[in-house]
């Protein structure tokens, strides 16, 4: 879990070249699950949407957490 603030951390694209990034430097996610293009990696909040409200970030975190749980429980 990385808490970044209101702009995407350059550490992510620099160390994870196979993760899809948007033109503004955000991580591209499925907004309904928080899934990224890299299996097992989820994102939400400012790193995915750009600067927004805390409420939206919390909602995205809740969605990602639910889907992370489902993903982990399906692993052998």
Image: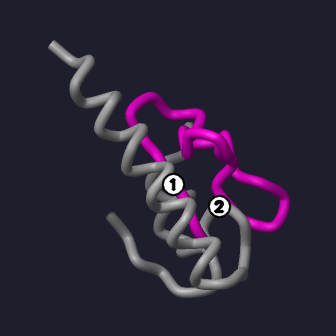
Q: Residues within 10 Å of mark 2 (few under 14, many from 20)?
A: many
Q: Residues within 10 Å of mark 1 (few under 14, many from 20)?
A: many
| Coordinates of residue 70 in the picture (x, y in percent) | 33, 30
Between residue 22 and residue 46, name the one nearer to us: 46
Q: Quadrant of residue 39?
A: top left
Residues at circles 1 and 2 in contact by the CB criterion of under 8 Å: yes
Residue at (42, 38) in percent of width and height: 67
Between residue 54 and residue 35, name the one nearer to us: 54
Magenta region includes residue 32: yes
- Tell me the magenta residue range: 19-45
Mark carried by residue 56: none
Q: Is residue 56 above or below residue 74?
A: below
On the rendered structure, is 38 left or right of 71? right
Residue identifier under label 2: 48
Residue identifier under label 1: 43
Q: Earlier in the sequence, mark 1 or mark 2?
A: 1
Residue at (66, 40) in percent of width and height: 30
| Coordinates of residue 16 in the picture (x, y in percent) | 48, 48
């Amino acid at each position: 879990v990385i808490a970044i603030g209101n702009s995407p951390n350059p550490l992510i694209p620099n160390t994870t070249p196979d993760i899809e990034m948007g033109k503004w430097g955000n991580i591209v996610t499925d907004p309904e699950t928080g899934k990224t293009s890299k299996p097992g990696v989820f994102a939400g909040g400012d790193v995915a949407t750009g600067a927004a409200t805390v409420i939206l970030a919390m909602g995205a975190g809740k969605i990602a957490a639910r889907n992370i749980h489902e993903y982990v429980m399906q692993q052998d």
